[in-house]
Image (cartoon, grey):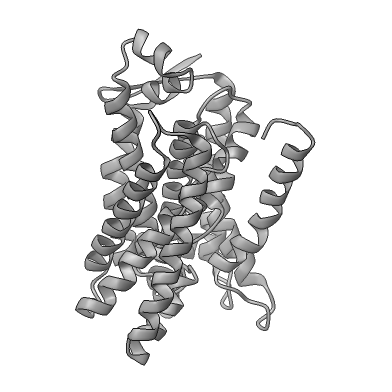
Amino acid sequence: MRILRLGPLGITTHRRTFAVGLALLALVLGLFVLALMIGRADITVLDALKAAVGIPVGSPTDFIVGQVRAPRALTAILVGAMLGLAGAIMQSLTRNPLASPDFIGISAGAGTGAVLTIWLVSASSLWVIAGGAIAGALIVSGLILLLSWRRGIVPLRLILAGIGMGFVAQSTTQYLLTRMDVHDAGNALGWLVGSVTGRTWTHVTVAVVVLAALAPIVLWHARALRTLEMGDDTATALGIHVARSRAVLAVCSVLLAAAAVAVTGPIGFIALVAPALALRVTRSAGVTLIPSALMGAALLLAADQLAQQMPATLQLPVGIFTAAVGAPYLLWLVWRASRGGPS
């Protein structure tokens, strides 16, 4: 066991989990450097790193790296980390590998809130759109909890209610698109496919603010989250305030997913796959928050790089690309469950 300390925060972790976390961090940093270098204009490592931190190298490298590639790559890293963390919290709270924000309708609710904000106030400010996305996600998640509550949250009811609310949210979004003018509808439709293309330092700032505000809260409740996996009675006996901890963690998961949707649009399957992969590589018996966040960052950044390297006629927004890659994983889960194996 190792204990990591950051100010008042102390995180207990297994040696393998610590080693996997370091390896994932190295992978994310390596992918980030590649994202700065590779493209239509190849740039050396040194020039890419200088331009990324604001050291003048010369035109057009300063613009290509500093204003296009760096914010795009950082957005992918931060949004991937938020989705991985949100998915890990949700799956741990419900003890269900299918309970991710995109699968149970929370991301769809955030998308509806953002599109409704664009329609009502003609919002172009990312902060305003983010507020609409968060409001939509909170409303939908509240309705899901109400529909799934029966003397406590029933995991199967949660999944079914989430899928149903997701379809309602998507239908509402489609209706709103028919009521918007052509220009706003085109912008909203392009945003709804999920993409990190054209992201700026404003998008990076929003993601940094949200992650910096919520990650410490989640890590502070990491022990409670692990204890809750043992059951409410055990958690109560060990001194955990079950209702408060579950509410705080659930709200953090919803806010992380909503902020991710506000920044890039809905990007599917990262929140579903990243925690499961993190559990497998760490061989942990319970939730792994930091590896899940790093795995989400690595997956989204790698998916964006792969999508960029596709032929011009086959290039897809990263949201569609991750859905195409993640769908086989969902089918594998169904196949594994049908054979009686653990999901």
Position of the C terminus by quadrant: top right
Q: Is residue 46 visible?
A: yes
Residue occupying the far top of the picture = 237
As rendered, which of 96 and 218 lies closer to the eye?
96
The image position of residue 188, as x and y in percent, is 38, 78
The image position of residue 180, as x and y in percent, is 33, 85
In the figure, 265 relative to 257: above or below?
below
Q: Is residue 51 visible?
A: no
- Which residue is found at the position 34% from the left and 85% from the top? 179
**Side of 196 where 141 appears, left or right:** left
Q: Quadrant of residue 132?
A: bottom left
The image position of residue 201, as x and y in percent, is 32, 66
Residue occupying the far bottom of the picture = 182
- Which residue is found at the position 61% from the left and 66% from the top? 321
- Which residue is found at the position 37% from the left and 91% from the top? 182
- Which residue is found at the position 71% from the left and 54% from the top? 328
Residue occupying the far front of the picture = 150
As rendered, which of 210 and 55 lies closer to the eye?
210
